Amino acid sequence: MKIKLRSLAVWTICLFMALGTAGCSKKTALSPSEFRKAMEKEDYSITDKTEETTTQAHAISVLVAANSNKDYQIEYYQFESSDACIDVYDRMVSKIEDQYPSGKNKKKNSVSAQNSAHFSLTVNNLYMYVSRIDDTLIYCGTYKKNKNKAMKTIENLGY
């Protein structure tokens, strides 16, 4: 009986450890060319804003993808380093939280893993999503009605 209980306990611990780390696996960042190719495949128009975006600290590539209806856009940033990306991510999240301290039906979600993090906020009629992987960042701000379409695309990208 003790052997069965001990065996059950060991298997239970192994199961919890496996499930506990399943969502924390390391993600793979997209390069600018991979982002462009994936978004064009989804019928988004891509604009390179790298030269125009001098205010983004240490950004080496900035691409903006607009869906075919121009309902929303998904912004892609690549930075000089992961640390620079983390800094910009933290500042973007703080700015969003400061801009919307309260509101109708406010829902916030934030998750951090090995080399990635994402943050989302739904407030009033708006939806904002920021995600980073290594030295890249994705941002989408849109009306709540476009959330599902935008998030399907973002999930397909792995962000």
Image (tube, grey):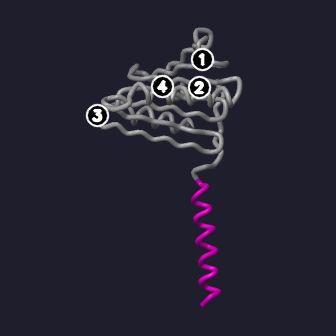
Q: Is residue 145 above or below residue 1?
A: above
- Look at mark 1 in the image and give the residue it sits on: 56
73 or 111: nearer the eye?
111
Residue 91 disc label: none
Disc 4, disc 2: CB below 8 Å?
Answer: no
Label 3 or label 2, whichever comes before in sequence order: 2
Quadrant containing the C terminus is: top right
Is 100 left or right of 12, judged from the image as shown? left
Q: Residue at x 65, y 86 (%)?
A: 3
Residue 104 disc label: 3
Label 1 or label 2, whichever comes before in sequence order: 1
- Look at mark 4 in the image and give the residue it sits on: 95
Identified by mark 1, the residue type is Gln
Queried whether the magenta region covers residue 16, the answer comes back as yes
Label 3 or label 4, whichever comes before in sequence order: 4
9 or 143: nearer the eye?
9
Label 4 or label 2, whichever comes before in sequence order: 2
Residue 88 disc label: 2
